[in-house]
Amino acid sequence: MTIGQLRELQRCCLRATLSLSQLVSIFGSLFKILTNFLGFKVSKPAHFLGINPAAPEVMHIDLNSAFAMTEQQANPFLRGRPVGVTNRLSDYAICIATSYEAKRAGIVLGTRGPEARMRAPNFVMRESDPAKYQYVHRKMRQIFESYSPVAYMKSVDEGIIDFRGMGPVLKGRSLEDIAMEIKARVQAEVGDWMTVNIGIAQNRWLAKVAAGFMKPNGLYVIDADNLEMVYHMMELTDLPYIKARNKTRLNEAGIFTAHQFFLAPERVLTKRVFRSINGHHWYLKLRGYETEVEYGIRTVGRSYVLEHRTADPEELAMLFHKACHKLAWRLKKNDFAARGLSLNLGYAAAPHKKANWGRRAGWHERQMWKVAVRRGDELFARTMQLFGHSPAGQVVSSLFITAYGLEPAKLDQPTLFEDWHTKKERVEEAMNAVNLRYGEHTLVPAAVAASKNPMKDKIPFGSIRYFS
Amino acid sequence: MTEERDDPVSVVASFTPGRGAVCVIPHKIKWRGQLYSLGEMGLYHPAKKGSKWMHVFEFSVRENPMTFRVELDPEDLSWRLKEVFYES
């Protein structure tokens, strides 16, 4: 039975008005019976590390089709209809998120508006509204934080609640029961159209696997008893973080299924597949041991997809200037200065050098300096230095500037007489104060005021660190 | 079809004290000389505009198959219609 068949079975059961808790117990029993019946006992080498026997106490909550569902919540006419969300509404806009109804009609990420309307005539495209998604994010975080001191959002639409060590507080209450309560609270406190997938397991990665197991509106628990069965039912690319590149690496080592991945010796993962400590981490996380470490802020970046693609160096310089001011704002907010800067350009045509991000044709360059900076004009000067090495005449479609090598911003030695550096600091502080009061881009450097590209904030897909 | 607007509108709203905050619900909205009454509230959410938090309400109306997005400015308590969605 594949995941697709399972999901279809779940939909059929839902139509037959079975509750989720009933479904979970049915599937749990089914897995146990199947495991016992089929006897999935594969001979393992003596050095094989067993599955983590700890109780599943980590909960992963994932909002279903978050952006599209939030749009459906906001507009009652969109409910039950195929909906797509795009960053800028135009005739040829691409879906960056789709509702479940759209997915069922074959409309996926990257589908253009006209094609989507051909597939589903009642398809509606909406422009993304980050304020709405941030609100939903904050509400979800509030709900999660009311259950455990170790609760946090991993991204805009998914969060973790860690119940490890909370046994006495739970007083025998099961995590399935809490999960059902969370589902009800999300509907009551965020919106009645909002549904979440919940997964419970021994570590965060497995909890994410469990959450993706019975979409939409699912609840699934992975423990030491059913873990191997779960791997038997999954493809390699069903596993979180295993996409085309990692799949190729695994295939090259003779690993073609999720279960073979689970059985692979640590040495193979470390030396042949991932060729780094990542192999060891995969070996552990596949068995339910915790490996994920939360790092603080290590980079600060600003990316932008150009509305008006251009090869004009002056227009590009204006965009760099704008992006650097945003970057400076973010560095200042977190009290950082950056020594390193990286510039990635995505090209609309004629690739010069393959960039490392995605499969887009583009160019990238990075450099580390001895002195850390944090002012917009200093970052801009360094960006232009990097840009000077890029091939001329390329039509740029996207840009991504990242500040790395972050260190705490040092207070400058006060001087008796104001120098140019102090003056520039004060000008930037004054500009920031005005923008904070009246809104972003109220005051911009004269050099960027003529830019045709507005560079508005759009959906922060990955990071949520700028939300707080 | 979506139409972006930025029109000042008159709104009849209720302000009910709740748990730690006042619950505001717009009931009637007068736009282009016509009165519309609240059908179903879709979503309320705050949106930052400079140092202000604007209150944004998205709801359907009873009279026509359409939804409104209206914004309440907390400083001067003025309402503006920001978007109209026509169901087609």
Image (tube, coloured by chain):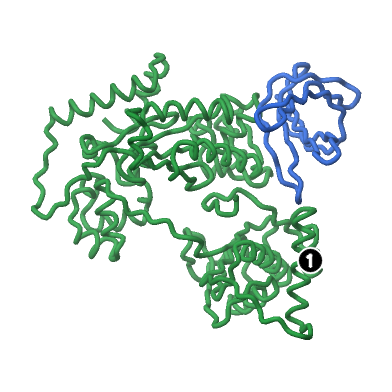
Q: Which residue lies furthest to the top in this view?
A: A16
Q: In this view, does A156 lie above or below A339?
A: above
Q: The green chain is which one?
A: A
**Residue at mark 1: chain:** A
Q: Is residue B78 above or below residue A457?
A: above
Tell me where residue A135 appears, x and y as whole percent. 62, 40
Q: Is residue B10 visible?
A: yes
Viewer-side residue, A454 vs A378: A378
Q: Residue at x 26, y 60 (%)?
A: A273
Tell me where residue B12 appears, x and y as whole percent. 83, 23
Q: Which quarter of the figure has residue A310? A: bottom right
Tell me where residue A208 appears, x and y as whole percent. 38, 42
Q: In this view, does A292 lie above or below A2?
A: below
Q: Which quarter of the figure has residue B47? A: top right
| Residue B5 placement, left or right of A455 | right
Q: Is residue A144 above or below residue A80?
A: below
Q: Residue at x 40, y 22 (%)?
A: A11
Viewer-side residue, A400 vs A351: A400
| Residue A158 placement, left or right of A388 | left
Residue tagged 1 = A430
Decide: few, some or many residues near mark 1? Use Cα within 10 Å; few <14, some 14-19, many ≥20: few
The C terminus of chain B lies in which quarter of the figure? Answer: top right
Q: Residue at x 27, y 55 (%)?
A: A250
Viewer-side residue, A151 vs B72: A151
The N terminus of chain B lies in which quarter of the figure? Answer: top right
Q: How many dots with numbers?
A: 1
User: The residue under label 1 is which amino acid type?
Assistant: Ala
Q: Residue furthest front?
A: A168
Q: Element under label 1?
A: helix
Tell me where residue A344 appears, x and y as whole percent. 55, 67
Q: Which quarter of the figure has residue A163? A: top left
Q: The blue chain is which one?
A: B
